[in-house]
Image: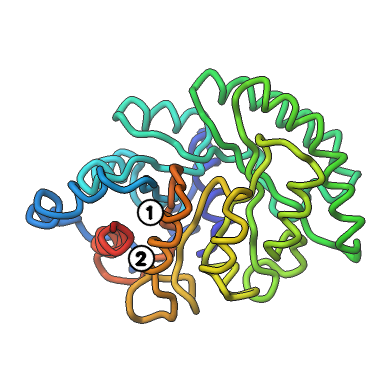
Amino acid sequence: MNRKNAIKGILASALGVPVARDAIYNNSDAPQPFIRNEQALSGGVSSKISQQGYRHSVCRWTYSSVTLEELCEVAIDLNIDSIELLNPSDIKKVQQRGLNCAVANSVPLSLTDGFNDPRYHAKLKQEYSQLIPVLADLGIQNLICFSGNRRSVGDQQGMEQCAIGLDPIVSLAQKHGITLVMELLNSKVDHKDYQCDHTTWGVGLCEKIGSDHFKLLYDIYHMQVMEGDIIATIQKYHPYIAHFHTAGVPGRNEIDQSQELNYPAIMRAIQDTGFKGHVAQEFIPTAENKFDSLAKAIELCTL
């Protein structure tokens, strides 16, 4: 399973296109029923969440083998504030359950054909211009976007072309109170040739655009793969970051002791910056009970 295919499956389902369950997950991947840990929720995690500055979110695509309703139930149990990377119809569903969507999906979704290529500017402008007012009516604050693949375009040229393509869309987003967040992805393992693959490149683009309504989605997993130095990077560049994603390194799986990152320390660094947004779990669970993995991750990331 990968993010692009999982999200395609979710979108197809939302549009009424039949999607075979096995096309997204093997049968062995189906989550086991979540067993609510009353002691953890009532005695510790719940009260701690109310005291910290940032809020918790979970990415829909990593749990696309369950219904959105099931994921809402678990999110509520775990005091998760948001289910994200949703299209408008699913945003309405989570809002009806009292949940938020911290970051909306761009529709249609493309990580490879992005703003660094002028061939896609007109198409992207049309798509985002249609989507932004709809999301604004739903009260959405953040909308994801992507640089696209290099395709032999140099970093400076790619940055300039991104800025040209993004400028009118950022202006529209600002009028509607929405921030575009460009995700930092690794080009070493998961997204070969992706251009926005280093924090400094993303920061340079933010400075070139010069708007508080364009910021970065700092993916901790991806940036550990590309450059490491996670805490120092967050401390230095936090004014440019609007959102965070998690996952374990290596493997992009659970964020427990089976991987190399010290997530409690990273969460303390995020909190110390005064960050008030969301930290979203985006790891691909491997445990038999996938919701238990989510519960443990939320506990680990709650100070």
- Which residue does the numbered mark 2 point to in the structure image? 29
Q: Distance between the residues labelled 1 and 2?
A: 8 Å
How many C-alpha atoms fall within 10 Å of the one at disc 1: few (<14), some, or many (≥20)? Answer: many
Residue at 70% across / 64% down in the picture? 197
Q: In this view, does 148 lie above or below 140?
A: below
The first of marks 1 and 2 along the sequence is 2
Residue type marked 2: Asp
Residue at 57% across / 40% down in the picture? 105
Residue type marked 1: Ser
Q: In this view, does 59 lie above or below 235?
A: above
Kindly identify which numbered label has been placed on residue 175.
none
Indicate the secondary structure of the residue bearing disc 2: helix
- Are the two marked residues, 1 and 2, in contact with CB atoms closer than 8 angstroms? yes
- Which residue does the numbered mark 1 point to in the structure image? 65
User: Looking at the image, can residue 60 be seen?
Assistant: no
Nearest the viewer among 164 and 17 is 164
User: How far across and down, in percent of the image, does residue 102 sit?
Assistant: 47, 39
Residue at 24% across / 65% down in the picture? 289
